[in-house]
Image (spheres, helix red, strand yellow):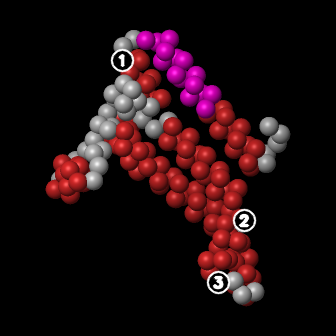
Amino acid sequence: MIFFSTPVGIAIRQNVIEFVFEPAGLVLAQFTVISSLAIRLMKNAFDNINPKYEQAARTLGCNRLYSFFYVTLPLAKTSLLSSIILCWARAVGEFGASVMLAGATRMKTETLPIAIFLQFGVADVAKAVTTVFILIFISVIVLLAMRKIGGRGPV
């Protein structure tokens, strides 16, 4: 919020896109919060790959780009897919940064956590609990997907 009141932020607001109290602010807030998690998870995915595979591809005549796309990326595929699912699930549950930047406007900047907040604000407990159960259902689906991708037992 403070950034968008600086000269650079004002120039972005006037010439590019409005973020404060707009749906684009939701995307920016979620991206900002989730990007650190995504980077850590994807770094871990690539760190767990033995560099000898890429070196072997390089000695067989592949360039760096080819060895990355045809050796390293397929080896990291499962970890990267898991990272994407976890980051998406984290973005679905993002509340703090979203409500600070995009606000809590019904049917405009409303996400599931903001909907729970708004429903409790007007004492509509039944709708709030229903929304909580939707988030729990999404969490269970994500956990089952992670278990299936990770190969830890039948799903």
Of callouts 2 and 1, the N-terminal one: 2
Q: Is residue 9 visible?
A: no
- Amino acid type of the residue tagged 2 in the rendering: Leu
Query: For this rendering, which residue is in front, 12 or 122?
Result: 12
- Under mark 3, the amino acid is Asn
Vertical comparison of 16 with 49: above or below? above
Q: Position of residue 146 (x, y in %)?
A: 69, 44
Can residue 144 be seen by looking at this rendering?
yes
Q: Quadrant of the C terminus?
A: top right
Residue 126 inside the magenta-drawn segment: yes
Real-space Cα distance between discs 1 and 3? Answer: 58 Å
Residue 40 placement (x, y as % from top left): 54, 58
For marks 1 and 3, the one nearer the N-term is 3
Q: Quadrant of residue 99?
A: top left
Residue lying at 63% horizontally and 28% vertically, measured from the top left: 137
Residue for badge 3 = 63
